[in-house]
């Protein structure tokens, strides 16, 4: 069946929409119900987490901060550097395959309940709009018949001022994940920080005030490839065609209806994407369940179950739902592998980072006494963030022949600081060593130690 758009009114302010299509403005009505209560709880929790997290500190650093200048990532008191990129990659892979796995099982629950676009629109923007301009009917009537009246003007100005405040605060909170919040909000940030904040404020204002559902329909890549992730066993929101059709049949007392749908259109009026769920599965549906709550409220008064519900195509056709199937098994296996890799990488994460480089321009030197000397520079970074005092580090070597002379110093390094230490290794002339001798340099601290492989060079050949 061809998709039929729900009744919408063209927005005179924006005659041409995305890709040259005429923009049909969506006026979703208010709705309440059990799924909307879940929306509110999850949405408010995410908003609180988003706005508060940059201000929470662990060991003097924000709970989450990606400091691009220093290339440091702070996560709940731990610091990660560019050498821990594998952890970031594994985290992104885990997030991606988690999305694939849960989409295969439960459809677009991410879009409906956790996506920032949905959360900000449903928990902040639409309530503000309803508070200032009223519900669906009032907004539609005012935009069509009451344009450029004093009442229309002050409401529009007030709404856009409120949207601007929300956009600026939201953009500032987002930038606070890259620049310390206290520094940013006390006018101590850099020009780049405030430039980024202004840019994201403009983007968010355009999205909140105008683009809205078009972001999901045209820009979000998830909507494009969701068809490859789902099948007839995936949970979707669907209309019970068998019970509902034909629509709008008589409900007079004593008369047996042939179709349960009374064509009240509440399911279409509350849809934030402006679609009619009764026309079957549509790409624009984000599984937000607003239509489910609307239909449940109407059908409850008629003593019948909702015509719109979470179900699967297999279930609607009377077949058994299979949670375990090839695609879910493959996604679950990949998730377990990525999680195991992340665990191994995290367990090998050290609070000390070190590398050993040969002194520039020096491969080896034969001293006057005949000893063969190699000079190295050991670069040590103290990745501790929870230490109040400097930590002492010593350098040890393993794998050198007996009688080798190792000269270096013990060094104290402050948390999050890097120090370069010279390391001189000398081997007696009578030592039988190959031209290239592998050995290990061990950097030992009070709480951690790391080993770095390097080589000793000489002119001798066995």
Image (cartoon, grey):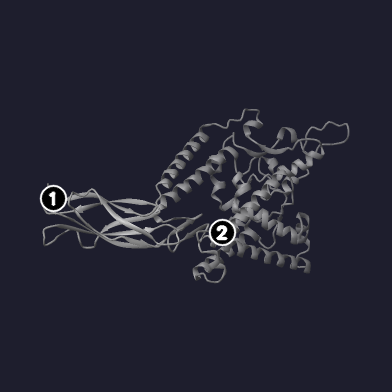
**How far across and down, in percent of the image, does residue 380 sit?**
34, 58
Q: Find residue 149 and report its image quarter.
A: bottom right
Residue at 73% over, 50% down: 7
| Residue 369 vs residue 132, the one in the foreground | 369
Which residue is nearer to you in this view: 34 or 80? 80
> Callout 1: few (<14), some (14-19), or many (20+) C-alpha neighbours within 10 Å?
some
| Picture residue at 59% right of the left edge, 41% below the top | 107
Which residue does the image show at 13% across and 57% down from the upper left?
A: 371
Residue 182 in sight in this render? yes
Marks 2,1: beta carbons within 8 A: no
- For residue 252, which numbered disc appears in the image? none
Q: Secondary structure at mark 2?
A: loop
Q: Quadrant of the N terminus?
A: top right
In the image, taking residue 314 as reference, residue 149 lies left or right, namely right
Reading the image, the residue beneath label 1 is 431
Say which residue appears at 64% left-offset and 62% top-offset: 166
Left or right placement of residue 257 versus residue 275 in this view: right
Frontmost residue, 337 versus 239 = 337
Distance CA(mark 2)–CA(mark 1): 58 Å
Residue 272 x %, y %: 68, 50
In the rendered view, would you say 250 is above or below 407?
Answer: above
């Amino acid at each position: 069946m061809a998709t039929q758009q729900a009744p919408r009114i063209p927005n005179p302010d924006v005659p041409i929409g995305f890709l040259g299509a005429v923009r049909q403005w969506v006026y979703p009505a208010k709705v309440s119900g059990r799924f909307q209560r879940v929306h509110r709880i999850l949405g408010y929790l995410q908003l609180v987490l988003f706005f508060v997290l940059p201000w929470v500190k662990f060991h003097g650093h924000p709970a989450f901060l990606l400091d691009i200048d220093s290339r440091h990532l702070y996560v709940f008191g731990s610091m990660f550097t560019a050498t821990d990129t594998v952890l970031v990659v594994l985290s992104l892979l885990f997030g991606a395959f988690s999305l694939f796995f849960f989409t295969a099982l439960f459809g677009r629950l991410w879009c409906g309940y956790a996506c920032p676009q949905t959360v900000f629109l449903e928990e902040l923007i639409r309530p503000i709009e309803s508070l200032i301009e009223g519900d669906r009917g009032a907004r539609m009537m005012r935009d069509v018949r009451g344009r450029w009246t004093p009442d229309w003007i002050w409401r529009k100005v007030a709404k856009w001022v409120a949207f601007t405040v929300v956009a600026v605060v939201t953009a500032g909170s987002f930038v606070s994940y890259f620049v310390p919040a206290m520094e940013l909000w006390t006018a101590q940030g850099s020009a780049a920080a405030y430039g980024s904040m202004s840019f994201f404020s403009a983007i968010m204002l355009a999205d909140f005030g105008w683009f809205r559902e078009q972001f999901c329909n045209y820009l979000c890549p998830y909507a494009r490839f969701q068809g490859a992730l789902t099948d007839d066993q995936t949970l979707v929101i669907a209309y019970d065609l068998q019970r509902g059709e034909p629509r709008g049949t008589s409900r007079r007392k004593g008369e047996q209806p042939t179709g349960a749908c009374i064509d009240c259109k509440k399911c279409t009026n509350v849809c934030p994407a402006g679609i009619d769920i009764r026309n079957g599965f549509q790409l624009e549906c984000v599984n937000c369940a607003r239509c489910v709550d609307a239909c449940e409220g109407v059908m409850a008064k008629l003593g019948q179950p909702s015509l719109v519900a979470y179900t699967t195509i297999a279930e609607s056709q009377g077949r058994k739902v299979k949670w375990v199937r090839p695609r879910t098994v493959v996604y679950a296996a990949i998730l377990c592998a990525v999680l195991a890799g992340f665990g191994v990488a995290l367990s090998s994460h050290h609070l000390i980072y070190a590398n050993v480089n040969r002194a520039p321009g020096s491969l080896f030197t034969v001293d006057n006494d005949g000893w063969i000397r190699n000079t190295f520079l050991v670069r040590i970074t103290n990745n501790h963030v929870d230490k109040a005092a400097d930590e002492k580090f010593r350098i040890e070597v393993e794998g050198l022949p007996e009688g080798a002379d190792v000269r270096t110093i013990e060094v104290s390094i402050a948390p999050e600081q890097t120090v370069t230490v010279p390391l001189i290794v000398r081997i007696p002339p009578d030592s039988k060593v190959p031209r290239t001798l592998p050995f290990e340099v061990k950097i030992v601290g009070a709480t951690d130690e790391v080993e770095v492989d390097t080589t000793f060079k000489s002119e001798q050949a066995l």
